[in-house]
Amino acid sequence: METATLWLKARNDTSTEPGSSLADANKGEEDILPKELYDFQITSKDHLSVTHVLSHPGDGWEGLKGHVNEEIIKKSPFKPDEESVVFLCGPPVIIQKAGLPALKRWGYGEDENMFGF
């Protein structure tokens, strides 16, 4: 979240370029940081869309369920090309075992337009 916040703050507020897409993975609804994400979206001036994915959602959850996977990643409006870049933040095992392989298969290149922290 901190990396994305810094990136959005660094962007020109008058930018008309395409925005950013964030897949926010959590266990349950109680783990979503609503104030932080709300402020984040407001600060982004409509340059950010957030998709929540819950691994253990409550009965009333209508959003995406499970784990961030290749199918969810490919729903991003930003296809791999020289204008797109992906930043992965999270537990190293998830980045190494799920995020990087899925993005590589889709066409992103590690340390070229895809970076994991």
Image (tube, rainbow, N blue to C red):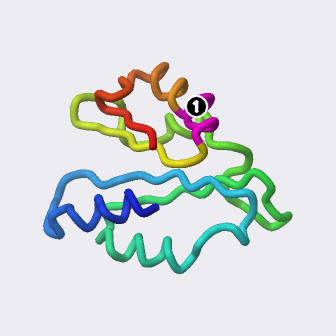
Q: Left of 67 or right of it: where is 13?
A: left
Q: Is residue 93 magenta?
A: yes
Give the residue drawn at x 63%, y 68%. Answer: 32
Residue 108 picture location, percent across and down: 38, 26
Residue 111 picture location, percent across and down: 33, 29
Q: Nearer the viewer, residue 96 or 99?
A: 96
Tell me which segment is drawn in magenta. Answer: 92-99
Q: Nearer the viewer, residue 47 or 12?
A: 12
Q: Left of 13 or right of it: where is 102?
A: right
Give the residue drawn at x 85%, y 64%. Answer: 59
Crowding at dot 1, Cα within 10 Å, few <14 / some 14-19 / many 20+, comes out as some
Q: Secondary structure at mark 1?
A: helix
Looking at the rendered image, the quarter that the C terminus falls into is top left
Q: Is residue 60 magenta?
A: no
Q: Which kind of residue does numbered mark 1 sit on?
A: Glu
Residue 115 picture location, percent across and down: 38, 37
Residue 61 picture location, percent across and down: 75, 63
Say how many tags the image has.
1
Give the residue drawn at x 29%, y 63%. Answer: 8
Question: Which residue is tagged 1?
Answer: 70
Residue 67 falls in image quadrant: top right
> Majority secondary structure of the magenta segment?
helix
Q: Left of 65 or right of it: where is 47?
A: left
**Depicted 25 relative to depicted 30: above or below:** above
Give the residue drawn at x 41%, y 71%. Answer: 40
